[in-house]
């Protein structure tokens, strides 16, 4: 048993498949460890709607933990202290992370 692993009991994989296709589910499977670390980082930053964020913006989680932290930290710094409420009230803010080069 590892404490650092997130169990995806709340993730709607059918929703991800509908939005992004079966290929995205394969990427999730192939990058499970990085995705788990990235989701845990979102929890550490005190996001409460991680499941919906993950389902709607899956591609931003498919990268190394360092790259993910860099992208999220840059956005957090730009938004300021209320970053959680700002992002959770308007998830479209995360769309800019979809277009950042790896």
Image (spheres, rainbow, N blue to C red):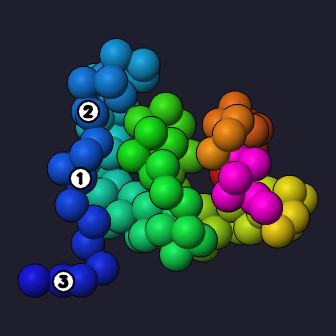
Q: Distance between the residues labelled 2 and 3?
A: 23 Å
Q: How far apart are marks 1 and 2 (CA)?
A: 9 Å
Q: Residue furthest top?
A: 18
Q: Give the range drawn in magenta.
A: 82-87
* Quadrant of res 79: bottom right
Q: Residue furthest left?
A: 1
Disc 1 or 2, which lies upstream in sequence?
1
Disc 2 or 3, which lies upstream in sequence?
3
Q: Main secondary structure of the magenta part?
A: helix
Check disc 2 and report the residue beneath it.
Answer: 13
Q: Is mark 1 on a helix, strand or loop?
A: loop
Q: Position of residue 41 (x, y in %)?
A: 51, 71
- Tell me the quadrant of the picture where the N terminus can be found: bottom left
The correct choice, above or below, for 80 with respect to 9 in the image is below
Q: Would residue 42 be seen by someone viewing this image from the given angle?
A: yes
Check disc 1 and report the residue beneath it.
Answer: 8
């Amino acid at each position: 048993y590892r404490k650092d692993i997130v169990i995806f009991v709340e993730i709607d994989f059918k929703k991800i498949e509908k939005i992004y296709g079966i290929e995205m589910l394969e990427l999730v499977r192939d990058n499970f460890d990085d995705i788990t670390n990235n989701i845990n980082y979102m929890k550490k930053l005190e996001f409460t709607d991680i499941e919906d964020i993950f389902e709607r913006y899956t591609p931003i989680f498919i990268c190394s933990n360092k790259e993910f932290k860099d992208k999220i930290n840059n956005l957090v710094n730009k938004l300021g202290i209320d970053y959680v409420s700002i992002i959770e009230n308007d998830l479209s803010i995360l769309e800019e992370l979809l277009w950042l080069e790896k």
